[in-house]
Image (cartoon, helix red, strand yellow):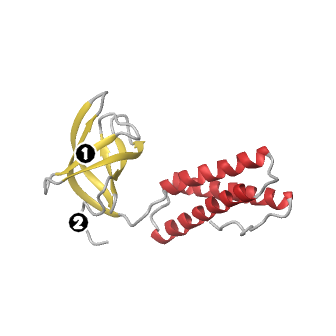
């Protein structure tokens, strides 16, 4: 993913149009990579994150410094900033390690209370990927307990995929914990 040309002061409508089009193309490319779960390469994720941050920064600067923008251009720049920010949140922030760690997952919400023993399949400094059979939605808060140490951590479901009719694959992000797994990164 290349980054858009630095635009400084955009002197013409054509240059702004080109910048907006380039940003959208790069955002679409990044979104496709995220759909493919193409985040195994830590360096590629870091480059993608920095490119997205530059797109967001340049779009924000342009929207704040250009006084002759049309309403459509302002909306497009705002959309680029919003979409870029969402993609930044979805881009991995650190390395992953494949593991097989037994845990108990707890969900307590106004809708339901569930607990299930499962295996964590992949970990990062700030989260985990694991399977689960009870109904859970993105954004729900959970508690995870390591079966080997008894330690607990709270987190939020950041993504989920249906594996089959009874199983979900979940991505969790932990609150206030950067190395729950006690691994060397």
Give me the residue at 39% from left, 37% from top.
Answer: 137
Residue 98 in percent (x, y) is at 31, 62
Q: Is residue 123 left or right of residue 116?
A: right
Residue 155 in percent (x, y) is at 31, 48
Which label sits on residue 182? 2
Residue 182 in percent (x, y) is at 23, 66
Q: Is residue 124 left or right of residue 28?
A: left
Residue highlighted by disc 1:
143
Q: Earlier in the sequence, mark 2 or mark 1?
A: 1
Which residue is at the front of the view, 109 or 39?
109
Quadrant location of residue 87?
A: bottom right
Which residue is at the front of the view, 28 or 60?
60
Element assignment for label 1: strand
Q: Residues within 10 Å of mark 1 (few under 14, many from 20)?
A: some
Count of all numbered marks drawn on residues in the image:
2
Which residue is at the front of the view, 125 or 63?
63
């Amino acid at each position: 993913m290349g980054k858009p040309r630095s635009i400084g002061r955009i002197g013409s409508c054509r240059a702004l149009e080109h910048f907006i089009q380039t940003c959208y193309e790069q955002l679409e490319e990044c979104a496709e990579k995220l759909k493919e779960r193409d985040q195994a390469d830590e360096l590629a994720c870091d480059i993608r994150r920095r490119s997205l941050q530059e797109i967001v920064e340049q779009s924000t600067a342009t929207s704040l410094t250009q006084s002759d923008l049309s309403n459509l251009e302002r909306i497009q720049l705002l959309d680029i900033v919003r979409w870029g920010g969402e993609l930044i949140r979805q881009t991995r922030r650190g390395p992953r390690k494949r593991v097989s760690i037994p845990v108990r997952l707890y969900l307590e919400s106004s809708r339901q209370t569930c607990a299930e023993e499962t295996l964590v399949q992949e970990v990062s400094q700030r989260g985990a990927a694991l399977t689960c059979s009870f109904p859970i939605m993105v954004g729900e808060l959970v508690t995870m307990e390591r079966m080997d140490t008894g330690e607990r951590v709270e987190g939020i479901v950041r993504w989920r995929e249906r594996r089959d009719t009874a199983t979900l694959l979940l991505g969790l992000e932990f609150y206030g914990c950067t190395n729950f797994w006690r691994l060397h990164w």
